[in-house]
Amino acid sequence: DQQVKQNSPSLSVQEGRISILNCDYTNSMFDYFLWYKKYPAEGPTFLISISSIKDKNEDGRFTVFLNKSAKHLSLHIVPSQPGDSAVYFCAARDGSGTYKYIFGTGTRLKVLA
Amino acid sequence: DTGVSQNPRHKITKRGQNVTFRCDPISEHNRLYWYRQTLGQGPEFLTYFQNEAQLEKSRLLSDRFSAERPKGSFSTLEIQRTEQGDSAMYLCASSFAGGGEKLFFGSGTQLSVL
């Protein structure tokens, strides 16, 4: 069972425009949600996180929105830059005591110059 | 600040051989995780430790896989009698319990089983 889903395998955006990456989850026991960026042959790099008790967190060009009732979160990147081109993973931490992190399948973002 | 270190970066082995990977977490981190990633998929949880105790192990982890974290510092992941389906990127991550929710990943070990 896929508890964290990223339904868009890829996304292309023009430089300077907004990139919106989406993620859905099923487990109401998740207490933190995180976004990671990954380049080929490297480990994922932490971008931004949000607690389940908040609905928005912002860090520079990156903003994460959480809609608990819909079990949905999104990552907004404004303005998008060519260096943002990478695979983005949504992850959720199980707060029921295991502290296990579950990852989505990723969305490949391509920012066109 | 020396992040999470994984060795080797690449490993090519023949089917049936045993392999061992090492992970050195960030020094003050007491939680250590192992994940596996294949092409087109997200990191898949394998197991995690808090200090030296292995607290959870995925059902996906067959008896051929074993992980240890002696003394709560570095960790090793061993795969016995490797199969072609074991070919993947093996990722190690660490975090500090009580210090936040961020997981910090190493660069991974790419395993190819021929």
Image (spheres, grey):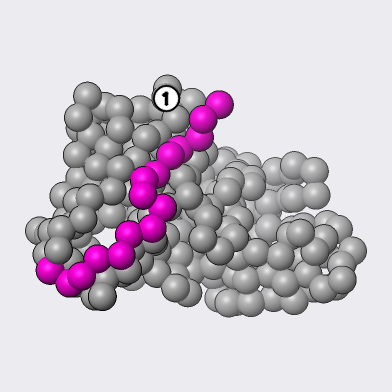
Q: Residue A36 at what x, y percent from top left?
A: 58, 53
- Toward the viewer: B9 or B83? B9
Is B16 left or right of B47, judged from the image as shown?
left
Q: From what the image shows, is residue B41 above or below residue A44?
A: below
Q: Residue A109 at what x, y percent from top left?
A: 68, 69
Say what secondary structure mark 1 lies in.
loop
User: Residue visible at 75% across and 76% down?
Assistant: A12
Q: Residue A53 at what x, y percent from top left?
A: 57, 41
- Which residue is denoted by mark 1 in the rendering? B27
Q: Is residue A26 visible?
A: no
* Quarter of the image that includes the N terminus of chain A: bottom left
The chain to which mark 1 is attached is B
Quadrant of the rendered image containing residue A87: bottom right
Question: Magenta span has B8?
Answer: yes
User: Residue visible at 41% across and 53% down?
Assistant: B9
Q: Which residues are magenta?
A: B1-16
User: Residue visible at 43% across and 34% down?
Assistant: B95
> Which residue type carries mark 1?
Ser
